[in-house]
Amino acid sequence: MYLRVFIILLYVITLVFGYPASKFLIEIEQGISSEFNKQVMINEDIQAHYENILDEVISTHNEDFLLTMTHSMTKDKLVSYYRPQINLLLNDDDYIDDKCLYRLPHLLGKQLFDIHADTFAMVAPMVQNYMKMHWPTPEDLDEEEMTAIEIEDHLVQLNSHLMTRVNHIMMDPKVISSHLAQQLHACQQQYHPYQHGHLWKRWMIHLFGVYDNHNVWKSEDREWQDHFLFKYLMDMQQDLKDQLDTRMEDLVQILQDDLYDEFVDY
């Protein structure tokens, strides 16, 4: 509104003083368009940077994890490795049917696919919100004067914000293990519907839709750091953090090129 009034006033003034109004208007419009296009370029480059890293890291870890699990589903491995770990996850010593253990790659595969999709989808709104709230606007700061250190400071904050979202929302071991426990109990009920100790769990799952193993993760006598699901999630989170830190300089250079780009389409 104010900008339109300002342009109209300029037009009237230039008519009075005989100076070509078109030159003023073109310069103003070009300046506004340039700043707008640069801001769009910066937003898109930041979003693409984070989406690419997340996609690469999660895809690689998911594929390796599920392939390794599938190939290790031998009878000996089920008895010596997976069954004890699943009992630890379920917080009981009930016998889990082999058919349910063999379904682990399928059960986890669907869940990890959903995590991948949800994590990827949260990048765009997260970046947009950060840019709106924290990135300097042309009114606050001449972006062409931003140094590499200033850009890096913003990206450090953005990296931290992203990892917080990933760690506590998208890849929380408690949430993932609880959902897996629910699926395993449901599977067990298909083969042993009246097994002792599972009737109340079946009722809880039917009533609330989830199996609460929150207390299991708090138990001090559990070696959760050795659990295959916990290790997988922690390794993926650490790899993601390392990739964000390692490739930050690449993004800094891209953003500097955006800021100093003299060939932005007007």
Image (cartoon, helix red, strand yellow):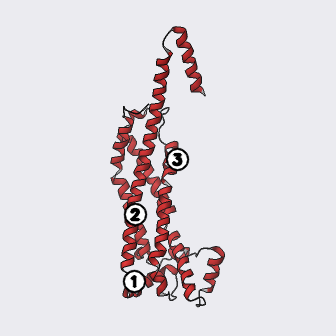
Identify the secondary structure beneath mark 3: helix
Residue named by callout 2: 59
* Type of amino acid at the residue the image marks with label 1: Tyr
Relative height, residue 239 to residue 71 (above, below) = above
Looking at the rendered image, the quarter that the N terminus falls into is: top right
Residue at position x 62%, y 86% in the image = 199
* Type of amino acid at the residue the image marks with label 2: Ser
Tell me which corner region of the image, top left, top right, bottom left or bottom right, holds residue 149. top left
Q: Is residue 218 visible?
A: no
Residue named by callout 1: 81
Q: Is residue 139 left or right of residue 201?
A: left
Residue at position x 55%, y 21% in the image = 7
Q: Tell me the crowding category of disc 2: few under 14, some 14 to 19, or many 20 or more residues within 10 angstroms, Cα based.
A: some
Q: Is residue 3 visible?
A: yes
Q: Tell me the crowding category of disc 3: few under 14, some 14 to 19, or many 20 or more residues within 10 angstroms, Cα based.
A: few
Identify the secondary structure beneath mark 1: helix
Q: Residue 106 carries which label?
A: none
- Distance from Cα at disc 1 to Cα at disc 3: 44 Å
Looking at the rendered image, the quarter that the C terminus falls into is: top left
Residue named by callout 3: 129
Q: Residue furthest top?
A: 17
Q: Which residue lies furthest to the right in this view?
A: 207
Identify the secondary structure beneath mark 2: helix
Q: In this view, does 72 lie to the left or right of 138?
A: left
Q: Name the spot of residue 236 as percent of width and height, x first.
A: 40, 65
- Distance from Cα at disc 2 to Cα at disc 1: 25 Å
